[in-house]
Structures are given as C-alpha cells and as structure tokens.
C-alpha cells in the first residue's frame, strides 16, 4: 500500500503542475514606438494610446528594444485615469516582460517613453494569458 501511495503522489503533482504549464498566451496587439529625435516638448517624446481591458483577465506585455542601433529601453506604463497601475520599470529595475491582472473592465491608457530620454525603437506586444 505504501508503494502505491509513493507512486501516485508524484503523478498527482505532475497533473497539478501540467495545468500551469499548459497556460497559453493569446496575441492581442502590438505597438511600435520609435523616437529618432528628441523634442523640447516632452509630449512629443512619448507614445500614448487607449485600450479596453477586461476584469479578471491576466495580460502579459513583452518589450523588444534596440531595434536598429538605438540605445533606449522603452518604459511602458498602464494608467487607470491618471494613476499608474502597472509598469515595466519599478524600483530602478527594468523588466522586458511583465503581467497585469485587470481588476475592472474599462479603458486604460498606455504610455510609452524611453528611459533616461534616450532615442529608441521598440516593439511592445500584448497578450491575454489563459
């Protein structure tokens, strides 16, 4: 009986972990942001758009930087009204991938700019995680 329990327990763990491994990302949209010249007007150095996100959905953002020979890293902020609810630059740490668990259905603003006012070219992809 003890041998059966020993054999079943690892199999049960495998089945439980398979669910998290089977998670899939559904591509929703991509944003290309390129800044070849800095402007004195700070708003011209940013990319801004509005998207609709759904309550209880998990979203993944991936950032591909340095397209071409541009040094900048794209900082992506998700705003609910004027409040930042998620970002890929937190506590002086930069993340090329980050997740956002949406707590209410509605419009969210996406603000993208380059770290340290550098020039840059980046591709940001948005996925729904299921």
Image: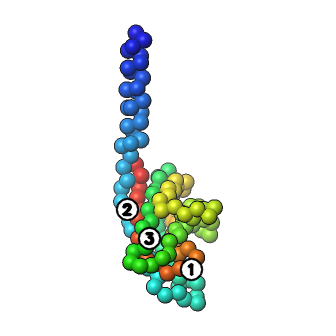
What is the crowding at mark 2: few (fewer than 14 residues within 10 Å), some, or many (at least 20)?
few
Q: Are marks 3 and 2 in contact (CB under 8 Å)?
A: no
- Closer to the observer: label 2 or label 1? 1
Q: Which residue is mark 1?
A: 117
Colour pattern: rainbow
Which quarter of the rendered picture does the N terminus lie within? top left
Specify the quadrant of the image occupied by residue 87.
bottom right
Disc 2 from disc 1: Cα separation: 28 Å
Rendered location of residue 11, percent (x, y): 37, 26
Of callouts 2 and 1, the N-terminal one: 2
Q: Secondary structure at mark 1?
A: helix
Rendered location of residue 95, percent (x, y): 52, 61
Disc 1 from disc 3: Cα separation: 14 Å
Q: Which mark is residue 65?
A: 3
What is the crowding at mark 1: few (fewer than 14 residues within 10 Å), some, or many (at least 20)?
some
Query: As displayed, is residue 36 above or below residue 85?
Result: below
Query: As displayed, is residue 65 above or below residue 53?
Result: below
Disc 3 from disc 2: Cα separation: 19 Å
Q: Is residue 121 visible?
A: yes
Q: Which residue is mark 2?
A: 28
């Amino acid at each position: 009986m003890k041998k059966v329990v020993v054999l079943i327990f690892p199999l049960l763990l495998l089945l439980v972990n398979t669910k998290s491994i089977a998670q899939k990302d559904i591509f929703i949209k991509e944003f290309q942001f390129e800044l070849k010249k800095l402007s004195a007007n700070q708003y011209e150095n940013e990319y801004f758009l509005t998207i609709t996100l759904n309550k209880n959905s998990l979203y993944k953002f991936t950032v591909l930087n340095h397209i071409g020979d541009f040094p900048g890293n794209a900082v992506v902020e998700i705003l609910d009204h004027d409040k930042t609810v998620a970002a890929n630059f937190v506590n002086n740490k930069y993340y090329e991938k980050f997740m956002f668990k949406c707590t209410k259905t509605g419009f969210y603003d996406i603000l993208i700019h380059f770290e340290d006012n550098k020039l840059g070219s980046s591709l940001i992809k948005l996925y729904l995680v299921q």
